[in-house]
Image (cartoon, rainbow, N blue to C red):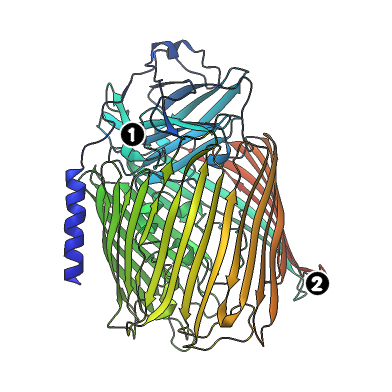
Amino acid sequence: MKKILLPQLFLFAFLSHVLAQKPNEEYKYHIHPASSPLRIDGAGDDPAWASTQLATDFYMVTPMDTSFSRCKTEVRMTYDKQNLYILVVNFKPVNGAIIVESLKRDFSFGKNDNFLLFMDTFDDRTNGFSFGANAAGAPWDGQMGDGGAVDLSWDNKWVSEVKNDSEKWVWEAAIPFKSIRYKPGITEWGINFSRQDLTISEKSAWAPVPRQFPSASLAYTGVLVWDTPPPNPGPNISLIPYAATRLTRDYQKDTPAKYKPTVGGDVKIGLTPSLNLDLTVNPDFSQVDVDVQQTNLNRFELFFPERRQFFLENADLFANFGYATLRPFFSRRIGLGVPIQFGARMSGKLNKNWRIGVLDVQTASQDSTPKNNYAVFALQRQLFARSNVRFLFVNRDAINYSHEKNEGTNRYNRNIGAEFNLASASNLWTGKVMFLKSFTPGKSNDDFSHAADLKFSKASFFWQWQHEYVGKNYNAEVGYVPNATRMGYYKISPNVGYLFFIKSPSIISHGPKLVSNVFWDKQRNVSDKEFIFSYNINFINRATISVWGASNYVRLLRPFDPTNLGGATLGTGTEHSWKSTGFDIASGPQNRLTYNASAIFGGYYQGGHRNNLRAELGYRFQPFVAIAMAGNYNDIRLPDPWNRKELWLVGPRVDVTFTNKLFFTTFMQYNNQADNINLNSRLQWRYKPASDLFLVYTDNYLPENFRVKNRAIVLKFTYWWNL
């Protein structure tokens, strides 16, 4: 293991060190206090704006990154003791035209004309905050981590207004210093401004960003220069109480309706301007936002993202350790089917180089599940330009554990790990080296895992190498490791791709891509092989087409039902090979009618065949109504005893945004694999910043006769109160 790790660490450290210069250091915006009071009304006519610096002359990011933007954009910023202010005038390249999906909060970036602000408040080019709006006034806010990923689940208290006329749309906002975290005493933040205008299919930025990277990339921020250090926000305490009531009934069991009122809440305490303490008592994690169902023809469990507010601030510090399929900590494991009684969570920056996260949550007992205490400790140290090293400890302890009563449950499970994350100054080189060890009663020896990857990305060429090793006794009960059911494995995933950029009125680039995944079991015999060769075409209007061919080999390490319908299974050790082809098509987002479609045609397990068609058709009556119809059809043909199986997952969705504070969403999902029809309707009124009233109605039906299985009505009230 040392022979593997040491060369990787040396290479990563070398790449970080030699590429340490910040690319856009010369782009500076000087911010000064407001000379008079400001009103946030989208008019931008307050006298204080006249004395601020003007940022303009944006650079094009896409479709090309070699010229100035064709859209004229003007940005001004100022501040007082309470708020950071921004005024943006977005001149329209097509007179009177805007393209937006709806007034929905935290909108889909690619489907809206928008302006976004990215702030690296710690000047570490790794973490920060994003705020913005689309051209109709829908707000956007998120916390940034890992050099530019924006977590839109994060929510906080701020004010935003947009006004439109035939020549321009104007965004004005006030962001309280209490709502963000920053290092006290420093006079330089990283900052960038991003503009997207779909009427001419262009994305631009104030500080230039290469087209292969998102405009959110903190590697390419300019500098926000403060005349004096940002003001200390002072006492920063927020109370977020809630009251909820639920009415539920199980019609299949013919039980009486259950009425359950609950109260509880959270407290957010700013220990310092960059370190936050979250407390929760009797938290309400009711599903006001229901997971979209998926057809599962996989041998492994599906992933659903975390949406619960208590776990979201600085979530990357806890949740991004490892890889998408090798996570030692996944917060949705906490409170899965049992109530959470209370919890505490401290997270944030200790100084410019050190971040810390500490979490402790207590759950109640229920049926055969004992009371559990979950504790997590995370520590991150910034290295070189944008790289870091992380340490993580995860502990689950059963408090009232009984071997007889809690059979099948381990008394404890612990994970400890370390990783080095590479991110060069220009973001051309990224990678990771990771090591994890678990501690579980009765499972010792070969209870560790190791993984690493290295990626090089330029506009026209990229390659990546990734490998994993997971021991047969490695166990992450509070994590997400679907491949662990292979009972220990080795894996390599080399990928490579190239793009040809051409001069064409419709096509911007095209090129091939090769993706591969190979698994070996503990005896070093191949258990899985997958090779996918695709050819991709990218259009100037953002439409894409990809055609591909694949080759698969699987040697089953445990029984598996290829239909996942709970029927007959293929035996352990049986071998299966097949080839398949397919395509993926996505329309450009400019038209009111949008679509995407994917298909798979080819072989399947046991010499069978599988044809799969997936499609989504959308239409918007901007900015108030967006309608979508999605479908996923699988036609599986196998020998006896499975024969032919047809699996459907279809359903419409309607989003109505009466204003940017009042939303109604309803969707229906028919899933014959789960033998279920689900109807969900949700009304949300954001009556004050970060304060909501929800009314949610949910039904589940039997598909064959449309009889109700169960029904739920939830009314939930939250209020954000800054002391």
Q: Position of residue 656 (x, y in %)?
A: 70, 41
Query: Which of these two is toward me, 553 or 259?
Result: 553
Q: Quadrant of residue 227?
A: top left
Query: Which of these two is toward me, 307 or 116?
Result: 116
Residue type pointed to by label 1: Thr
Numbered badge on residue 704 = 2
Q: Find numbered disc 1 in the image and state the secondary structure of the residue it sits on.
A: loop
Q: Quadrant of residue 403?
A: bottom left
Q: Quadrant of the N terminus?
A: bottom left
Q: Quadrant of the C terminus?
A: top left
Residue 485 in view (yes/no): yes
**How far apart in space, not on screen, are marks 1 and 2 (Cα)?**
56 Å
In the image, farthest residue toward the front:
503
Residue type pointed to by label 2: Glu
Mark 1 burial class by Cα count in 10 Å: few <14, some 14-19, many 20+: many
Q: Position of residue 364 (x, y in %)?
A: 50, 70
Mark 2 burial class by Cα count in 10 Å: few <14, some 14-19, many 20+: few
| Residue found 46% across the figure and 10% down from its top | 47
| Residue found 37% across the figure and 66% down from its top | 328
Q: Position of residue 85 (x, y in %)?
A: 43, 24
Numbered badge on residue 221 = 1
